[in-house]
Amino acid sequence: MPMLVSYQWLKEFVPVGDVAPDELARRLTMGGVTVEKVIPVNQGVRGVVVGEVKAIEKHPQADRLLVTTVDVAAADGRPLTVVTGASNLTVGCRVPVAVHGSRLPGGRKIERSKLRGVASGGMLCAWTELIEGEGHDEDEGILILSDDAPLGADVVPLLGLDDHVLELDLTINYASHCQSMIGVAREAAAILDRPYQAPRVYVNEEGIKRAVDLVKIEVSDPDLCPAYAARVISDIRLGPSPEWLRRRLERAGIRPINNIVDVTNYVMVEYGQPLHAFDYDQVADHRVIVRRARPGEKLVTLDGVERGLDPDMLCITDPEKVLGLAGVMGGLNSEVTATTRNILLESANFSGQSIRRTSRALGLRSEASARFEKGLDPNGNVPAADRAAMLIEELKAGVVAPGVAEFRARPFLPVTIRLRPERVNSLLGTKLSVVDMARYFRRLGFETDGVAEGRKHFTVTVPTRRPDVSEETDLIEEVARLYGYDEITTTLPQGAITHGGQPVLEEWRVRARRVLAGAGLNEILTDSRQTPFAHGASRWPAPPTLSPEQAAAIPGGIPIANPMTVEESVLRSSLVPKMLEVMAYNVNRRQTDLGLFEINRVYWAKQWPLTELLEEPLMLCVGAVGKYAPKTWNRPEEEADFFYLKGLLERLADGLGLRPPRLAPSNLETLHPARQAAIVAEAGEGAANGGPSGDGANGGAGADEQPLGWLGELHPQVAKAYELPGRPLILELNFERFVTLSKPRTYRALPPFPQVERDLALVVGEDVPAEQVTAAISETGGELLRSVRLFDRYAGAPVPEGHVSLAYSLVYQADRTLTDAEVNAVHERILAALAKRFGAKLRG
Amino acid sequence: MREELKRVKDEAMRAIEATPTAAALQELRVKYLGKKGALTGILRGMGAVPADERPALGQLANDTRDAIEARLADRTAALETAELDARLRAEKVDLTLPGTWLPRGTEHPMSQVIEEIKAMFVGLGFQVVDGPEVETDYYNFEALNIPKDHPARDTQDSFFITPEILLRTQTSPVQVRTMEKLAPRLPVRIITIGKVYRRDEVDPTHGSVFYQLEGLVIDRDITMGDLKGTLTIMARSLFGENVRIRLRPSYFPFTEPSAETDTSCPVCDGAGCRVCKGSGWIELGGSGMVHPRVLVAGGYDPEVVSGFAWGFGVERMTMRKYGIEDLRHLYSNDVRFLRQF
Ligand SMILES: [Zn+2]
């Protein structure tokens, strides 16, 4: 419920007539009272004038239509004939007439026309036709103006349509004192440096008995109700409010109801203090008791709903029953109705926190509760009660009993704060004088004491209507905003020179991102939250930080206690499920060739239930499916397969300058049983922050060692569950641990001597892992062998059944020119070793 | 013999001219200058020549050989050039065929903007720091001057794991964590960028998770003017040399004075356009002078030092930078979107 401020109403309290609404909005915003928008009340009414109905006749052709003769004080002196369907007209009443050529909201143009054969010179207007969106009791009929409305006059100023409404978007610190017309007016006065004119209040108290003799106020819980005031008004005459009052309520977004309710609402808007009227004769013993609800108590509120109350809720009661929920809603049992003769007008101060809790608990929020929630001036309740009593008396809606029956927990005194001018200037970077500062405070209505140039400090007394100002730093902010943030000179921090930088892990992340994007992959960013089912669907292992029992308690991830949707209800422990979802999302959009990666945090509880914060390791995930290189006119297409994924891992390690990780057999249920591997650090390397494996899924990765991650082809069942075609590939590794495999980049002087290249084609049994053959070559080759590269693998004739041919390219190099004899000797040694270990033969 | 030499020379010269290929010229060379060639044949008859004529005839024979050699060389070069030209002309390709396909991946636009921001602040001497996304109530609220029941908690509705552990609603907890580590050292110049979570309704410009850029500077004599200056540099580096910064009074429990921070619209230079919804300004986020109570929570004495801080939404900056109209595109991970960056 935003605060709506009528510009015309505001002018009653502060002279801003020369400041256009838009400019006023800008100034207020830059002064701290944020105006969200400025809404012109007139949505396009032009040329509509006051007319007097001179005659009413039946339409000759239509039962439901009337033909009226209306005097609009036209220049030619001739009255208009206007056809209308309204039934609330009487001869002599004055009404708004949209004459030929006039305009109504929405650009609607009024012209002479014929209605069932009778010429009509315009249109008589209902309120809703003149102003859209405001409800009105005369919805059904033509708006009847007061008899003194000048004939022929423009209705726009007359009806207050020449107004603008400023919609405020208040920050918490202004929410209390700017939820009222006078609060906003005080701010406008301070910001624009204009005088503030408070409403003049004088209550004509013509009742016989004093309020204190008519009602007893007892507050049992003064912590929740620091102040309570009641006025008693007798001889109530319920009826509609006058036009001006109704119009102002409409501007503030409140629907007029009857004069008593309207006055309470009017004062709430004007003073910011909600009021409530009880039927005085329904209050047993005429004793009002403010207390917490008792267990099991119930109340039927004004909206007809029976509410169960709990002892956290503050109630207005009498000795017999609950009369209302303090600050939230009254009870039906004490409602002001047509038969009400006397009322008790409550103006109280309730604890904002208590009201907030109650209105939340019951799902009841109103203009009143919204104001109480913000916290109100504890000294503001009696003036508001007086203002309401004055209006009721002026409207002749009742007779006011003298005085106020009142409770105050204690005196509420303004706070006095010491301000050091030097501190103001040093924090803001300004050069304001002591007198300048004091002047700002006086504009705000704060008193100052001890102001003199050269003083180290002076004091400022802040009225209770500004609870947001309670210490020196608050005063500094007041100076800053009235001086103007725009006026503060732009400078740069001085002081020691520092060198910037980022965490090493971030550097790694940047480089990894570059390597993978360079290899053709697209980076994705996904939410940390997912459905509790996502993890199970992916079949990925549980985090290694939890015991199997703990992991089983939260199989979907760490549950959020108050999620908005089930899709965002757990924190993920792996990037894999979202990766699969993103792949499926793209495949559904006919993007079937995908190479994606994400480097992001996952969330591992160190125990469950949680007793401390999480581990949030940075993980790297790759997902690929389809072709990683398309068929082009000069190149064949390349399908992503296990070795593409392994190649990416090797490229990543190489690009980051890491020792290549080793692959070990694994048995994850997510992956193809024969095409998957655990990524492990070489023995004794990296793998520092592992933690015990809780899932037993780390296959051959060594007894205690948690793998860095896994890679492989997706299991067809998992692929099917995600509706992924082909042979999707997934890799996830613990990036933080992966980068601990780093080795320093070393430079080696380029050799001045030529290298010798030899090829080696072998035949070995097909079960012999290529990696072991490669390792054996490197090992036997020793110092002279600089590199080994497998460049061909072939099975089929003439290679014997059950065997494969592996072809290697070997490079020899030394710090001298190698002789053929030297190279041959090493080459022979390698062959001999391979023959011995693997039964390898030279391919003929 | 003179006549014979002349005849051989003339014949060789004619033959060279008439030969169409460099290979055939080689045969001519053998025919005339080879061991069994015509010239050698003539010289063999030298024995029959009177001794006094021999030197002159020998000279003539050499001249004849040289002349044929030279002509052969010229002609060979000419023919080779012609042949090469012809071959190269035959190697014509369709230049309009596409170049050979090479892989090109992309970094997410958010990552790119984050790196740009980090690089800029690192250049200004800031350290990039990190903090947990799942935080304690203490760091997310209490230490930031937001005690329980503070109305500011209503505006930052949070996701809880336990009553005391929640998904951070802002990156500001990193302020206090960093101060605790650094106090009482000066100056503090840090930024942190990371995810924050709020229970807000999702719409084209707000999600329930977003990235925030948080900055903090603490030193002696830090002023609000320094805040304006630092943010001006940032805005200019991201959006262009001409943008201006505007601070509007606002409220955050952990800063005072507090401000909403706007940058002049880089598209219309403040005149008002569709991008800035006619206002001429684009909202970046909150900023302000660090509240004394937050300094105390971090271990600094507010009587001795002061500081400023800010927290901006990174999505908004990214959207602004690339003209992306709907926040949800950033997290759709549609490759047709990603491949544009
Ligand atoms: Zn613009």
Image (spheres, coloured by chain):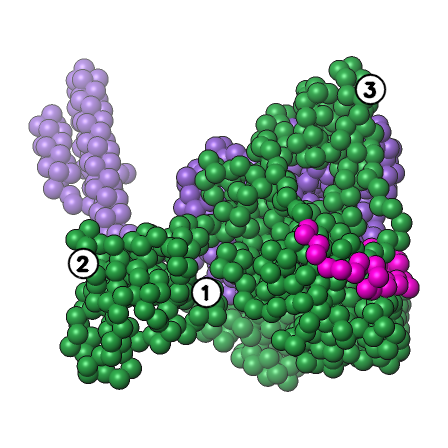
Q: Which residues are magenta?
A: A203-228
Q: Seen in the image, is A842 located left or right of residue B273?
A: right
Which circle marks residue B239 in the picture?
A: none
Residue B89 location (% of width, % of height)? 23, 48
Q: What's under tag 3, amino acid-wise?
A: Lys
Give the color of chain B as drawn: purple
Q: Mark 2 vs mark 1: which is more N-terminal?
A: 2
Give the alpha-carbon distance from disc 3 to disc 1, as whole Å: 56 Å
Element on which disc 2 rests = loop
Instruction: Judge the density around disc 1: few (<14), some (14-19), many (≥20) Cα neighbours within 10 Å.
Output: few
Residue that mark 1 sits on: A133
Give the alpha-carbon distance from disc 2 to disc 1, as whole Å: 35 Å
Asked if the residue at label 1 sits under 8 Å from ligand 1, the reply is no
Image vertical order of residue A236 relative to residue A272, above or below:
below
Residue that mark 3 sits on: A456
Element on which disc 3 rests = loop
For the colour green, the matching chain is A
Instruction: Judge the density around disc 2: few (<14), some (14-19), many (≥20) Cα neighbours within 10 Å.
Output: few
Q: Quadrant of residue A487?
A: top right
Which circle marks residue A78 in the picture?
A: 2
**Magenta span contains residue A539:** no
Q: Mark 3 vs mark 1: which is more N-terminal?
A: 1
Residue A673 location (% of width, % of height)? 70, 80
Element on which disc 1 rests = loop
Give the alpha-carbon distance from disc 3 to disc 2, as whole Å: 78 Å
Dot in front, 3 or 1: 1
